[in-house]
Image: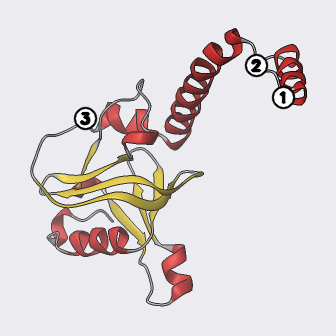
C-alpha cells in the first residue's frame, strides 16, 4: 500500500464515506502476500530450507506430537509456533502449518544420531524459560525447545546407545 492509498483511506475514514472499492479488493491480496513473504523469510533465516535439503520429510508413525511448541531456531524465536514430532526415525521439526512457508514445504526428519543435546533444561521456572538447547553438528544449526517438548527430546536422546551418540 503506497502513501497515496493510505491518505485516501484516512480521508475516507474521517469523512464517514466507505473506502474505495479497489482498496477493499487489494487489501486481502496485500495481506496474504506480506504473510507469505514474512513466513518465507523466517523459514530461510531459521535454516529450515537447509534442514529439508539434508534431512527430507519422512512418513512414519509419531510417538509424540507437539503442534504449538515454543522455542527458537538460530536467531528466530517461535513462540507457540513450532511443530515437534518424535518418531522412531528422528525428530520432526518445523514451523506449525500457519507459519510454514509454501516455498519451504515439508517437515524435516532429523535422525537421532545427528542430534546432540548441548544444555539440559533445569527444574525451575527460569530454567524452563531457557529451555533445552540442541545442535545439529552437520549444519552447525542450534535450536532451543522450551517445556515438555525439550524434556521429551532430552529423554529420547538419553535412550541412544553410547556408540551412536555424537562426541
Residue 15 location, quadrant: top right
Q: CA distance from mark 3 to mark 1?
A: 50 Å
Label 3 sits on residue: 56
Where does label 2 land, which residue? 19
Q: Which residue is depicted at the point 40% across and 29% down?
A: 104
Q: Which residue ends up furthest to the top in the rendered image?
A: 22
To which quarter of the image does residue 29 belong? top right
Name of the residue lying farthest toward the bottom: 124
Reading the image, the residue beneath label 1 is 13
> Residue at the location (51% across, 43% down)?
46
Contact check, label 3 and label 2, Cβ < 8 Å: no
Mark 1 crowd level (few <14, some 14–19, many ≥20, 10 Å Cα)? few
Pointers 2 and 1 in contact (C-beta within 8 Å):
yes
Residue 34: x and y in percent read 61, 27
| Horizontal arrangement in the rendering, residue 105 relative to residue 74 (left or right) | left
Mark 3 and mark 2 lie on one chain; the one further toward the N terminus is 2
Rendered location of residue 54, percent (x, y): 31, 35
Amino acid at each position: 500500500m503506497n502513501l497515496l492509498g493510505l491518505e485516501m483511506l484516512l480521508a475516507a475514514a474521517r469523512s464517514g464515506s466507505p473506502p474505495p472499492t479497489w482498496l477493499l479488493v487489494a487489501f486481502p491480496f496485500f495481506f496474504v502476500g506480506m504473510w507469505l513473504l514474512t513466513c518465507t523469510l523466517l523459514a530461510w533465516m531459521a535454516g529450515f530450507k537447509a534442514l529439508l535439503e539434508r534431512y527430507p520429510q519422512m512418513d512414519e508413525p509419531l510417538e509424540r506430537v507437539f503442534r504449538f511448541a515454543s522455542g527458537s531456531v538460530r536467531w528466530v524465536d517461535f513462540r507457540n509456533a513450532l511443530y515437534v514430532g518424535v518418531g522412531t526415525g528422528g525428530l520432526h521439526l518445523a514451523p506449525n502449518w500457519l507459519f510454514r512457508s509454501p516455498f519451504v514445504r515439508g517437515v524435516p526428519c532429523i535422525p537421532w544420531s545427528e542430534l546432540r543435546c548441548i544444555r539440559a533444561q533445569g527444574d525451575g521456572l527460569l530454567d524452563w524459560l531457557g529451555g533445552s538447547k540442541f545442535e545439529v553438528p552437520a549444519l552447525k544449526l542450534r535450536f532451543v525447545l522450551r517445556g515438555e517438548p525439550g524434556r521429551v527430546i532430552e529423554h529420547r536422546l538419553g535412550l541412544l546407545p553410547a556408540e551412536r551418540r555424537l562426541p
